[in-house]
């Protein structure tokens, strides 16, 4: 009778504790639910299962159940009374030193799910047991679950496993650490790798292997941004986010910023630069409507390192594709605005097309680059230098002025229906600056 009474009291105390845990979970917004095995398993790339035999298992690592996840909370405290008799009978058996059979568990990563023996696990929790005997079946999956995992976390772990299996990045770079906190972001990373592989092939003129593209993306695209994130100490300003989260948001912002500068920020005017950043920020917030993204945009717009990072990346891509530094090593070519190296590549592409039309043959890309440099870029640069207008733009380069002159000349030629001499455009640009006017370069579609 004493054991029965004590077991009844234990159950009442366990139910009471479960009630208060539920209240605390609601107030703090924490997850207090036992994880459903079948639902979790559906999210995992399962390769099979195998029997491990009877082992002792840490009770705190049992975080889910096959069929009774609605009857207990995350600490396996009972949240209902309909199975009271079963719970009390097991607790009573402990008081009477009756040996109970091992429970049956599924093991996934570092955690366990109850196949049979939910009440035995619940009583063990309430009695403060550290270990419990169990028959264990291990589920073979590359996803490693830990005791603090949630249902949403399982989905993310599954996406992470697919990312690493598809990219083989962990095999190619064993020290890699990439983890996101938002669903769907791993697929964005895979899309980036696919696009990067295509661009590499286009730039090199040969097919690039998947492994080569993955390593190139990681070392030349991902790591430089992450390094800046670390140097700037950004992560501490975004608790709950990861380096990969910030990388994806920043890289998306970079893309939007390039396009905004390319279309409307060519004049180098402060207003154009501000509007380009505002447009890029607007598009990023639409793509990622998260409070952290809004705060990140505000932080990025207060710094200048992002623009430098974009320029370094764009310049590297430009010279890798054109090999201009090898074809014409004496030529100095540098722009100060994001997106403008893409405009230069478009100039070269157009020039190559015209050369092909003139020669009635396909022109090798290297020949087109050299011809553009010798017959388009350098002659205009010489005019700019002869008229000495570069000193009126101390924060800009001769390449910036080249781009402005090309755009203005295009606009004026279309407006007046006739070709406007380059030297007149350069002179007009200089005169406006001398008069204290801000030169306006109308954006046109290349």
Image (spheres, rainbow, N blue to C red):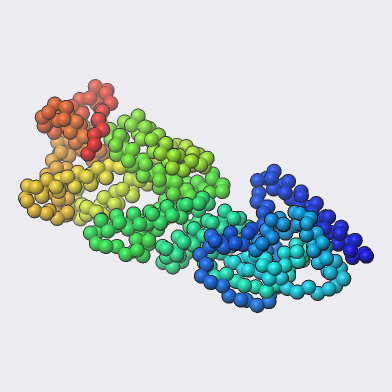
- Residue drawn at x 7%, y 47% is 358
- Residue drawn at x 25%, y 28% is 439
Q: Is residue 175 above or below residue 366?
A: below
- In the rendered structure, the answer to whether residue 107 lies left or right of residue 210 reads right
Q: How far from the left and from the top, in percent, is residue 33?
A: 67, 54
Q: Nearer the viewer, residue 390 or 101?
A: 101
- Residue drawn at x 23%, y 47% is 345
Residue farthest left in this picture = 359
Q: Nearer the viewer, residue 283 or 70?
A: 70
Residue farthest right in this picture = 1
Q: Is residue 389 above or below residue 143?
A: above
Residue farthest front in this picture = 82
Q: Identify the image quadrant of the N terminus.
A: bottom right
The reply to whether residue 57 is visible in this rendering is: no
- Residue drawn at x 76%, y 48% is 20
The reply to whether residue 24 is visible in this rendering is: yes
- In the rendered structure, the answer to whether residue 373 lies left or right of residue 165 reads left
- In the rendered structure, the answer to whether residue 93 lies left or right of residue 369 reads right
Q: How far from the left and from the top, in percent, is residue 273?
A: 35, 34
Residue 110, picture quadrant = bottom right
Q: How far from the left and from the top, in percent, is residue 370?
A: 15, 50
Q: How many marks?
A: 0
Q: Identify the image quadrant of the C terminus.
A: top left
Residue 94, picture quadrant = bottom right
Q: How far from the left and from the top, in percent, is residue 78?
A: 76, 57
- In the rendered structure, the answer to whether residue 184 lies left or right of residue 408 reads right
């Amino acid at each position: 009778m004493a054991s029965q009474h004590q077991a009844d009291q234990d159950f009442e105390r366990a139910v009471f504790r479960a009630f208060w845990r539920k209240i605390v979970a609601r107030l703090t917004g924490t997850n207090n639910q036992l994880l459903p095995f079948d639902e979790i398993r559906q999210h995992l790339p399962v390769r099979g299962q195998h029997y491990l035999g009877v082992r002792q298992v840490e009770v705190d690592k049992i975080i889910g159940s096959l069929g009774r996840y609605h009857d207990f909370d995350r600490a396996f405290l009972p949240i209902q009374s309909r199975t009271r008799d079963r719970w009390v009978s097991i607790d009573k058996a402990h008081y009477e030193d009756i040996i109970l059979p091992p429970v049956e568990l599924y093991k996934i990563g570092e955690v366990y799910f109850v196949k049979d023996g939910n009440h035995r696990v619940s009583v063990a929790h309430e009695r403060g047991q550290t270990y419990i005997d169990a028959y264990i079946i291990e589920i073979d999956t590359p996803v490693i679950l830990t005791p603090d995992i949630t249902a949403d976390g399982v989905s993310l772990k599954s996406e992470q496993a697919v990312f690493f299996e598809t990219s083989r990045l962990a095999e190619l770079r064993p020290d890699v650490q990439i983890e996101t906190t938002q669903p769907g972001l791993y697929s964005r990373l895979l899309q980036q790798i696919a696009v990067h592989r295509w661009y590499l092939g286009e730039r090199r003129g040969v097919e690039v292997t998947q492994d080569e593209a993955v390593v190139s993306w990681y070392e030349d695209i991902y790591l430089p941004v992450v390094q800046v994130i670390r140097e700037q100490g950004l992560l501490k300003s975004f608790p709950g986010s990861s380096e990969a989260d910030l990388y994806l948001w920043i890289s998306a912002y970079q893309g939007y910023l390039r396009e905004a500068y390319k279309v409307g920020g060519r004049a180098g005017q402060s207003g154009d630069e501000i509007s380009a950043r505002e447009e890029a920020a607007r598009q990023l917030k639409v793509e990622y409507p998260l409070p952290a993204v809004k705060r990140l945009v505000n932080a990025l717009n207060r710094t200048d390192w992002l623009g430098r990072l974009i320029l370094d990346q764009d310049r590297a891509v430009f010279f890798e594709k054109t090999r201009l530094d090898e074809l014409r090593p004496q030529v100095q070519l540098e722009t100060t605005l994001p997106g403008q190296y893409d405009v230069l590549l478009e100039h070269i592409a157009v020039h190559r097309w015209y050369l092909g039309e003139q020669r009635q043959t396909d022109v090798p890309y290297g020949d087109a680059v050299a011809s553009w440099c010798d017959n388009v870029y350098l002659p205009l640069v010489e005019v700019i230098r002869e008229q000495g207008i570069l000193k009126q733009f101390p924060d800009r380069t001769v390449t910036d002025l080249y781009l402005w002159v090309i755009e203005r000349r295009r606009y004026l030629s279309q407006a007046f229906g006739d070709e406007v001499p380059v030297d007149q455009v350069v002179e007009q640009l200089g005169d406006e600056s001398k008069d204290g006017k801000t030169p306006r370069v109308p954006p046109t579609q290349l």
